[in-house]
Image (cartoon, rainbow, N blue to C red):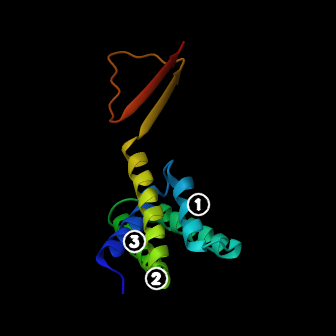
Amino acid sequence: MLVEGLIAVAAAGGGAIVQAAGTDAWAGIRSGVARILGRGEAGREQAELERLDQTRAELESAGAGAGSERAQTVLATRWQTRLEMLLEQLPEDEQQQVAVELQALVQQAQSQALVQNTHNNFSNATFTDSQVLGSGTQNNTINR
């Protein structure tokens, strides 16, 4: 049975996977999770990459609204369970090492989620009493 701290790390890992899907953080999270779950075996790592790609596809097909929220919850729970199962199988010293690796991936996903950039490129555009609304960092380029 896992201690509460390891369960929390697994839950955060499952959430980070779902959070990262479809963002700039995805490639790093995807490869990191596959490496952790693959445990050094190329075949297992490839299988995990395929599972992760399936997760992303399911999230994309869920669209927006209540269906999206349900899909996010189901998939985050599914990944949490996979991570918990891995942690349960490991000796205590390896559990701690994997927990540290998972926590680093969670922090990576969270930090990249906080930095959302919007890039607008307006070529040959005319603006009269215009406004650009948004949040985060915006880079607007006006080419005339």
Figure check: 141 above or below 60: above
* The C terminus: image quadrant: top right
Q: Quadrant of residue 136?
A: top left
Task: Give the residue pinned by disc 3.
Answer: 10
Q: For this view, does 45 lie left or right of residue 107?
A: right
Q: Earlier in the sequence, mark 2 or mark 3?
A: 3
Q: CA distance from mark 2 to mark 1?
A: 19 Å
Tell me which amino acid carries mark 3. Answer: Ala
Q: Which mark is residue 118?
A: none
Q: Which mark is residue 31?
A: 1
Which class describes the residues within 10 Å of circle 3: few (<14), some (14-19), or many (20+)? many
Other residues around mark 1 within 10 Å, as few (<14) / some (14–19) / many (≥20): some
The residue depicted at 51 percent of the width and 47 percent of the height is 24
* Residue type marked 1: Ser
Which residue in the protein does label 2 denote?
Answer: 85
Looking at the picture, tell me which residue is in the foreground, 24 or 132: 24
In this rendering, position of residue 113 left or right of residue 44: left
Q: Earlier in the sequence, mark 2 or mark 1?
A: 1
At a point 44% along the width and 79% down the height, the residue shown is 92
Quadrant in the rendering for residue 140: top left
Q: Residue 1: percent from the left, percent from the top?
A: 36, 87
Q: Nearer the viewer, residue 125 or 17?
A: 17
